[in-house]
Image: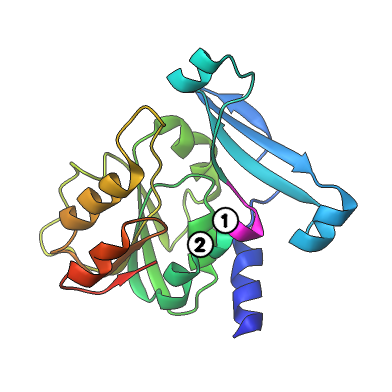
Amino acid sequence: MRDDIQRLITAARVPDTVRPQTFGLWRIRRIRLTPGNALRVGWPTQTRLERYTLAVEMAGHSGGELVMEDSRRELSRHLPCWLNAHGNVLVTGLGLGCVVRGLLACPKVEHIDVIEIDRDILRVVGAEFTGHPHVALHHADALSIKPKKGQRWDVAWHDLWTAPEDEHLSILHGQVIMRYAHYCAVQGAWQFPRWAKRLWPTPLIG
C-alpha cells in the first residue's frame, strides 16, 4: 500500500513541461527547495498556482493568493480519490492537473471528465491532456452545466477553490455534491464539513 501511495503522489506532480508563467489572473511559480526541505519532501522543486484577487490587491502583496501546490502534504489530500477511483470519473476543477495525473496512474480508471470554469487554466494546464484518449476537458461551470441524458460517473472528485472574499469553500463543495447526487455513485472533496459524511445518504470520500 505504501508503494502505491508513493507512486500516485509522484505521478501527480507537475511536470517541467508546465512552465512557470503568468497568464490572466494566474501565476505558475516553481520554487527550488532547500536541501533539508527537499529531503523531507522527496523532490528538489515545488510548483505553485497563485491567483491575483481583490484581497491580495487590498493587502498590497506582490504575489497572488496560493490556490494549490504539488507538495506532498497537498497531494496526499487527494489520495481518497485515487484509491477509490474506477470506471468513469468526474473531476470538477483542473487546477495544476495533479488530480488528473494521479487518476491516469490508476489502472481501474477508464475515462476522466474534467469540468473547468476558467478558460486560461484550460489553455495553459489543459494543454497537457488535450487529445488524451482517456480525458475529456469541458469548459463550463460545474454548478450549471447539464450532464448528458443517461450520464453516470462511478466516482466524482470536486477539487474547487474560492477566493477569500467569496463564499466559504465547504459551502461550495456542499453545493456541487448536491448538484451531482443523481449522477455519481461516490463523491468526494478534499474539504467539506465532517457532519456532511454523517448525514449524506450516499458514500462521501475525502
Q: Report the residue at 28% width, 45% height from top.
A: 172
Which region is colored magenta?
A: 69-73
Coordinates of residue 3 in the picture (x, y in percent): 66, 82
- Residue 17 seen in this snapshot: no
> Residue 162: percent from the left, percent from the top?
38, 37
Q: Which residue is mark 1?
A: 74
- Helix, strand or loop for disc 1: helix
Looking at this view, is 66 or 144 the one in front? 66
Residue on which disc 2 sits: 77
Q: Is residue 50 left or right of residue 37?
A: left
Furthest residue in direction bottom, as rendered = 1
* Relative to 9, residue 30 above or below: above
Q: Nearer the viewer, residue 180 or 196?
A: 196
Q: Which image quarter is the N terminus in?
A: bottom right
Q: Please tell me whether residue 170 belongs to the stretch shown in magenta.
A: no
Whether the residues at callouts 1 and 2 have beta carbons within 8 Å, the answer is yes
Q: On the image, which quarter does residue 8 sit in?
A: bottom right
Q: Residue at the spot x=84%, y=61% of the render?
A: 39
Q: Residue furthest right?
A: 35
Badge 1: few (under 14), some or many (20 or more) residues near its Cα, within 10 Å? Answer: some
Residue sitting nearer the eye, 75 or 154: 75
Q: Please give the name of the residue rendered at 55% of the width and 71% of the height, measured from the top-left corner.
A: 105
Q: In the rendered structure, which amino acid carries the disc numbered 2?
A: Arg
For the residue carrying disc 2, how many other residues have a C-alpha within 10 Å: few (<14), some (14-19), or many (20+)? Answer: few
* SS at circle 2: loop
Please determine whether, in this image, residue 34 is positioned above or below residue 151: above
Type of amino acid under label 1: Glu
Residue at the (17%, 53%) spot, across then down:
179
Residue 70 highlighted magenta (yes or no)? yes
Task: Using the image, tell me which numbered label, if any, was put on residue 160.
Answer: none
